[in-house]
Amino acid sequence: MRRAILALALLAAPAAAQTPWPEALWNPAPLPDDLVLPLPCHGRIALRPVPTPMEPGPLADRAVTLGEADPATGYAEFPRRAHVAGAFERGGQRLIYLGKYEVTRDQYAAVTAERCPAPSEAGRLPAAELSWFDAVAFTARLSTWLAGNAADALPGRGRARAFVRLPTEEEWEYAARGGAAVGEAAFAARTPPMPDGMAAHVWFAGPDSADGRARPIGSLRPNPLGLHDMLGNVAEWVLEPYRLNRVGRPHGLPGGVVARGGHFQTDASSIRSALREEYPPFSPRDGAPLRLRTIGMRIALGLVVTVDDAAPEAFRAAFAEEARLRAAAAEDPEALLARLRAEAAEPALRDGLARLETELRTAAGRTRERERAALRAQIAAAAALARQVAVARGNDAVLAAVRGLLDGVQPVVPEAARAPIVDTSRALAGHLAETPASVAQLLDAYLRAVRQGALAEPALIEAEARVVAEEMRARRLGIMAELAALAARQMREAGAGRLPAAAETEAAILALARAAQSRR
């Protein structure tokens, strides 16, 4: 009985440490928007917000392409379409919360050990030699402790509070690639942007990097989302079982457990965001849960989907609206199949029609995702063209001022030294003379993009424009988010029969540019 009481006490709250932990041991590179949660023993753990810009609505999510096209690993990592959605909201933005660093030895001990650890530099090393079951048990114990001791520190939605879990594979790879903080080309690259080279961001195999051992968390530079050691150092367990890739979709057979990201014994040439490795959950040698010194963990926060009693009704309404937008009921092959299925007398025929109906719904959903992606690309392209118009006119103002200065000094310069000034002034005049034609071409391309985007429904244009603007703000592209909003507004106006004239469009673009300049 005494042993059972002691175990329950330890689960609720391991003995407290005397003083708070030094921040350098659990968050060596603090950022203003870190989410910091308490741990037992006066510890702390930092998480990062990972934005998932997407249209509003209960069934909204963000379509992404994960994986990598490499014949050698196609069975595991071939590119596939996946979806992510942030469960949490902050400042109107949907977010995933992911551990900023790998869980350290001290953090693991604070949650699971009978005695509080003495925080130390050695305890800043990532906790490794953890089985997948150890990792899941850690998240369960921490969730229990937070719910009982620091519920107010947990983000939530409605009445629901967050709980701690392992990240899904989709969440992990989306964050490892840089999420919405990078452009599409950088997101699809083998590794996220590393301006100072891989050695500045990743602990990999070799004497020039990890040299055969794990290193303290946060010793190297983060990825574009502020996450450290996503690649290298120790690999990280994820939530779901391993599945093969069947040319762009997960295979139906679940396998062992999955570790992502590579580790300190992974060659630099093998480091990649798509790297995923399967392990048996139990050691073939003795049947005990598999524990390796190269694998640790990183936490994520989860939230129940049905956060209140009204959620199912909102989901039903959103699902019905999605179905309505795909096609009118009279022309909808799904409606026809549903009627045939209801009238079919034979069970085998009903089952076959039900499977066909499901396939049609899936195909229609993919088509709508492609339409949304194309519309987002159209809005972003129009914003880029608008920015070129603003840059061209801004450059003109500078060049015109320089030419005026040169023309003003010509009379006071000796005639022998006047030729270079005259030549430069003429060259500037020629460039200025060409600008109207180039701006006209840019405006023409911009208005073509607006006309094409106007074919979409106004509500869809508005929703996808918000996604584009969030992405651009996440990438700190300044005025581009405002230009995207302008393009979307003009698309809706064009859809209503009012395509703006080129002069009106140019004036609106330049007004935005001047306003942005005045805010700097």
Image: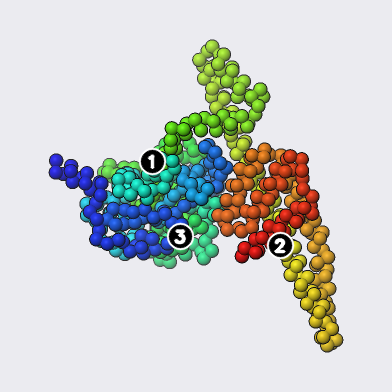
Question: Taking 388 as reference, is 378 above or below it?
Answer: above
The foreground one among 240 and 413 is 413
Task: Identify the residue shown where x is 34% and y is 42%.
Answer: 281
Indicate which disc residue 256 carries. Answer: 1
Indicate which disc residue 32 carries. Answer: 3
2 and 3 marks in contact (CB < 8 Å): no
Q: The disc labelled 1 sits on which kind of residue?
A: Gly
Is residue 266 among the parts visible in the rendering? no
Task: Identify the residue shown where x is 52% and y is 30%.
Answer: 316
The answer to which of marks 2 and 3 sits earlier in the sequence is 3
Q: Which residue is mark 2?
A: 391
The foreground one among 330 and 154 is 154
In-image side of 124 versus 403 (left or right): left
Quadrant for the N terminus, please: top left
1 and 3 marks in contact (CB < 8 Å): no
Q: The disc labelled 2 sits on which kind of residue?
A: Val
In the picture, residue 372 is in which quadrant? top right
In percent of width and height, residue 518 lies at: 65, 64
Local packing at callout 2 (Cα closer than 10 Å; few below 14, some 14-19, many 20+) is some
The foreground one among 479 and 209 is 479
Question: Taking 397 as reference, is 224 above or below it?
Answer: above
- Which label lies toward us, 1 or 2? 2
In percent of width and height, residue 190 lies at: 53, 54
Helix, strand or loop at mark 1: loop
The answer to which of marks 1 and 3 sits earlier in the sequence is 3
In percent of width and height, residue 6 lies at: 18, 46
Helix, strand or loop at mark 2: helix
The Cα–Cα distance between marks 1 and 2, rounded to whole angstroms, is 54 Å
Task: Identify the residue shown where x is 61% and y is 29%.
Answer: 324
Outermost residue, top side: 345
